Image: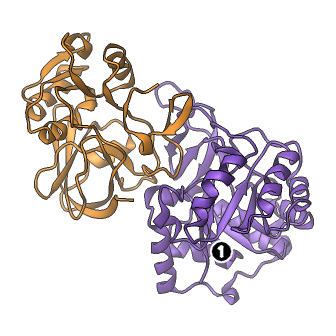
Amino acid sequence: MTPILNASGCLDALTAPEIAQSLDAFVTKTVTPLPREGNPPPRIAEVECGMLNSIGLQNPGIERFLAENLPRLSALGVPIWVSVGGFSAPDYTAVCEQLDDRAEIETIELNLSCPNVEEAPETAAELVAAARGVTSKPLYAKLSPATWDVAESARAVAHAGADGLSLVNTIRGLALDPTTRRPKLARGAGGYSGPGLRPIALACVHVCAAAVDLPIVGMGGIASGDHANDFVSAGASAVALGTVLFADPWAPARIRSELEHEGTAAVTDRLPIGRRSVSSPMV
Amino acid sequence: MNARRERVGVLGCEPVGAYTLLRLERGGLEPGIPGQFFMLEVPGRVLPRPMSLCQAPADELSFLMEPIGPGTRALCALEPGSAIHVFGPLGNGFDLDVARPLLVAGGIGIAPMPYVLDALGGDAPAILGFRSDRHAEAAASLLPGAEVVVEPRFVTELLPDEPHDVLACGPEPMLEAVRALVPSAQLAWEAPMACGYGACYGCVVERDGHYVRLCVEGPVLKDAA
């Protein structure tokens, strides 16, 4: 059965423990070295076929996360993936170092692609290499779909030591107030997610599965067992739920039962992947 | 979570002045504490909409809204016999264990007040402000005993001099004005909300110098910073 996770930042296991326990692994909201208040509100807006968010990595920082959140998360009895973020390679290594010896953490996901904060100057591969140097935990690289050739990014992070890929993060979008024609979100643009992101995410999974031999957590607008099967067919070995959790907290159990009913797409059902034909840039 | 999510039938949409009262079957949902809210599925939209409960007659839950955007317009157009998912009750409602309650509402902020009044045993004064006579028509059917003003007059003009336990809901400038006059007031705030249960961190408001989730800490806040 295809494992079902949540997308980072789309579920708080401490306010909705029974939903977290319905997942095969819980992925935390991104943790940074220092506490962050996040971006000013308004932070979300619904748009056609999806939503925009600009939360800005609000989190308690690694010290408080380890002292207060992690003990409560590990008590839930569900495997814990910690999403790690930062603004430079030393930020990533500082957090990963502190997670490395915590047995209750199964996997580290490197958030290399948040569209709502300043980006680190290093490339995704450089950040993966830096994290690889300080932890033996499995490292998943979460990549942006907003790149000319995501397969090239996938090859680079694989070479740098990533153990898996999380595909994809949100893609930057803008919504204007119909009266004022000013941005609806305080920060201007935000990350676009939901049904409109799904074909984009599916294409990224498809080309990356052909480019690298790493497990892929597919995500982006998945809202049904059928959608999940699409991602498996394209090359994902697990799926993560994001925006659908906002509308339906019990989506993990529903999608799992849909997969049981329909059957998970078998590996043999996967799309034939013509390397050149699909890895050329699409616009 | 104590909240449930259920698909419930639509009983009808009734015009109330400029507003619409959406009446739903209650199903197995609890009405909760006045001031709490429910997330209402909107057919054809990605996100549900947060609505405070207006009335809780037997076997029903009803929600008052103004059709101003794609979500509320779709909700106000629901046909009897259709059904939507409803998730709740969510958040923290009003503390009704008070000596001298006074209900204060502006515009669509009247929405939770009929249920508040009902929970108080039907015996509390109410003062209401609206931006037009057509909006003010809602008062007569929802809170018949209330004192009403229409812009350019503001509801704060009606605040009595003697101390009351103010329970208020309305637009942000009104709540700020009420808080300035009655610092102890319980205020029901509003914010764009994606999930309603603490998952998205979208609905934050500033409180004591920090951003807190209105859906978890509120929507009713007392002594907000």
| Count of numbered badges drawn on the protein | 1
Q: Is residue A200 left or right of residue B192?
A: right
Q: Is residue A64 left or right of residue A53?
A: right
Could you tell me if residue A204 is visible in this image? no
Residue B189, position as x, y percentages in the image: 37, 32
| Residue placed under numbered mark 1 in the picture | A238
User: Residue A37 sits in which quadrant?
Assistant: top right
Q: Is residue A28 above or below residue B132?
A: below
The chain identifier of the residue carrying mark 1 reads A
Q: Residue at x 59, y 71 (%)?
A: A78
Residue A258, position as x, y percentages in the image: 47, 79
User: Residue B17 sits in which quadrant?
Assistant: top left
Q: Is residue A277 above or below residue A96?
A: below
Could you tell me if residue A280 is visible in this image? yes
Q: Is residue B208 left or right of residue B112?
A: right
Of A97 and A26, nearer the camera is: A97
Q: Residue at x 64, y 58 (%)?
A: A70
Task: Spot the residue most to the bottom.
Answer: A268
Q: Quadrant of the N terminus of chain B?
A: bottom left
Of B115 and A246, nearer the camera is: B115
Of B63 and B209, nearer the camera is: B209
Q: Residue at x 70, y 50 (%)?
A: A31
Residue A9, position as x, y percentages in the image: 60, 53
Residue A273, position as x, y percentages in the image: 78, 78
Specify the amino acid type for callout 1.
Answer: Ala
Chain with colour orange in the figure? B
Tint of chain A: purple
Q: Is residue A19 left or right of residue A146?
A: left
